[in-house]
Amino acid sequence: MQSPHRISIIGLGVMGQRMLHNMHRYPGFEVVAAFDPDPAARRHTQSAFPAVTVVADAESAIQRDDVGAVYIACPPLWHETHARSAADAGKAVWCEKPLGVNVQDSTRLVEHVTRAGVVNIVNFSLASASATFEIEQQLASGALGEIRGVDIRVHFSQWPRAWQMAAAGWLSYREEGGFTREVLSHWIYLSRRLFGPLALTGARTRYPDDNLAETHTVALLDADDVPIGIAGSVGGQGPDLVEYTIWGSKRSYRILDWNQLWVCDEGQHDDSPNPAWRAALPEIADPRETGYANQLDNAARALAGEAHSMPDFATALQVQTLVEDILES
C-alpha cells in the first residue's frame, strides 16, 4: 500500500478546515502542519486536530523536510506568494481557485511553477465530480445529439453567504471577492473541460459601488459555436440557485446545487410546458461525499505522477482570464 502524501495546509478558513477534515476521513493524505494568520483559527485547529503541528508562520509549514506537498487555501491575494515559495522548495502545490486576481501575476506564477518542475493542481470541485464524469462519457457517446447551448444560472439572497461570513473581509469586496470568482469560475472551468477553449463574446457586470463585489453579471461565451449563457445575481428573498444545464437535441443534463445530476431524454416529456427531469445517477446515495472522496483520490494520483482528473495552474489561468474579463466589462 502506498504511503500517504504528507502535506501542509496554508489557510484555515472554511476551505482549509473542510480539506483538513476530509483528509482525516479519507486515505491518501497525512496533514503534517498547518498555518493561518488568525490566532483563533490556529487554536481551534490545534484543539480539533492535535496530531497536526500548527505553526505561527507560513514558511515554517512550507519548508518542513517531512512535507512533500502544500495545499493553499488562503485569500487569493496570497496564493502567488505561497505557491512560489512551495515551488522553490520543491514541493507539489495544490491551490484553491481562483489562482489569483491579477492575470499578469498569475501568468508569471504559471511560468514559475513550470520552470520549477513541480506538480501543480487547482481545486475546482467539479474536476472529480460524478456528474462531470457521467456527462463526459455521454458526450463522447453522442447520446446528447447536437449541443444547442449551455446555461449557467446562479442567484444568492446575500453575498457572502451565511456560512462564509468569517471571510466577509475579502469576499465582500471587488478586489478579491464576489460570486463570479468564487462560484461561476467552477462552471466556466467545467464548460472549458467539456467543450474546449472558450471565447468571451459579450458581458455586463454591475457593482453597487467602486469597492464592493458585483451584484449582477451576464455574459455569453462561445465554445466552437456552442453558446454558453451566464446569469448571476445577488439580493432578494428566496432560495439560492446554482444550476448548470446542457441542452442537447436528444438529451439534456442539468446539475443542481453542485452535485445533483438530472437528465431529460427525447420523448420523455409530455404536453406540459416543463419537461420532466429524472435523477441521472440514482445509485449514488450521497454525491457530495462521493465528490470529496473522488477529489482526494485524484489529487493523490496527481501527486504520485499517475493519471488524474485535476486541472493544472495553466488551465486555472485560462479560467481566471475569462473571469477577470467578465468582471471588467
Image (cartoon, helix red, strand yellow):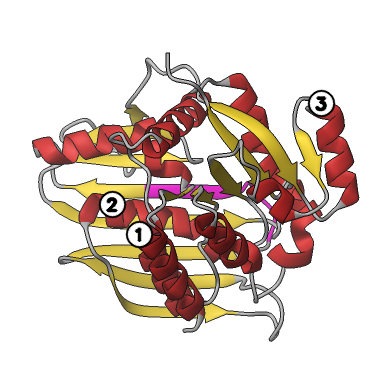
**Residue corresponding to mark 1:** 315
Q: Which of the 4 image quadrants contains residue 67?
A: top right
Is residue 149 shown in magenta? no
Q: CA distance from mark 2 to mark 3?
A: 39 Å
**Where's residue 301, x and y in %?**
38, 32
**Residue corresponding to mark 2:** 193
Crowding around mark 3 (Cα neighbors within 10 Å: few <14, some 14 to 19, many 20+) is: few
Is tag 2's residue or tag 1's residue first in the polypeptide sequence?
Answer: 2
Q: Is residue 160 left or right of residue 114?
A: right
Q: Nearer the viewer, mark 3 or mark 1?
A: 3
Is residue 242 shown in magenta? yes
User: Residue drawn at (68%, 80%), measured in percent from left and top?
Assistant: 208
Mark 3 belongs to which amino acid? Pro
**Where's residue 11, x and y in %?**
70, 50
Mark 1 belongs to which amino acid? Thr
Q: Which residues are magenta?
A: 236-244
User: Residue drawn at (37%, 15%), measured in percent from left and top?
Assistant: 283
Q: Which of the 4 image quadrants contains residue 24?
A: top right
**Residue corresponding to mark 3:** 50
Q: Is residue 280 left or right of residue 323?
A: left
Q: Give the camera-side residue of 259 and 98.
A: 98
Above or below: residue 136 compared with residue 245:
above
